[in-house]
Amino acid sequence: MLEIKDLYKSYGNKNILKGINLEVLAGDIFAFIGKNGAGKTTTIKCIVGINDFEKGQIKIDGMDVVKNPIECKKITAYIPDNPELYEFMTGIKYLNFIASVYEVDMEEV
């Protein structure tokens, strides 16, 4: 379900991810554990397409996150520590927005 090959990410002169390789199979449960600054959040943000990266490849269900970003986002979920809230949207408008992103039929919504 998730494959990371030779992933590198830096912020300026600071190398955060240095050649990460990882494979998570369907049905596996996987957790990132480490001290602050170890690259846990950076890795996750690269996986879900929030951060770009200098080198490497990330595949979700066999699809490259760089070449197929929309398809990958449709089958993943990401809940950040500090979620961005759209204050101009009511709760119902936000739910309708999310349903449209995932192409849920409006009758079903």
Image (spheres, rainbow, N blue to C red):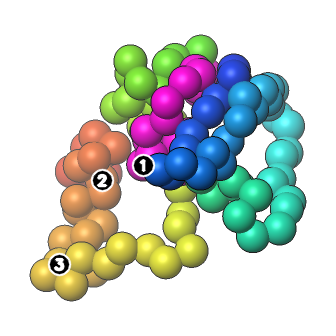
- Disc 2 target residue: 99
- Disc 3 target residue: 89
For the C terminus, give its image quadrant: bottom left
- Indicate the secondary structure of the residue bearing disc 2: helix
Near-viewer residue (22 or 9): 9
Q: Earlier in the sequence, mark 2 or mark 3?
A: 3
Amino acid type of disc 1? Ile
Nearer the observer: mark 1 or 2; the answer is: 1
Near-viewer residue (90 or 64): 64
Segment colored magenta: 44-61
Q: Is residue 39 left or right of residue 48?
A: right
Is the residue marked by circle 3 packed among few (<14), some (14-19), or many (20+) residues within 10 Å?
Answer: few
Is 11 drawn above or below residue 23 in the view shown? below
- Disc 1 target residue: 50
Q: Is residue 90 visible?
A: no
Q: Residue at x 57, y 74 (%)?
A: 81
The total of numbered circles placed on residues is: 3
Amino acid type of disc 3? Met
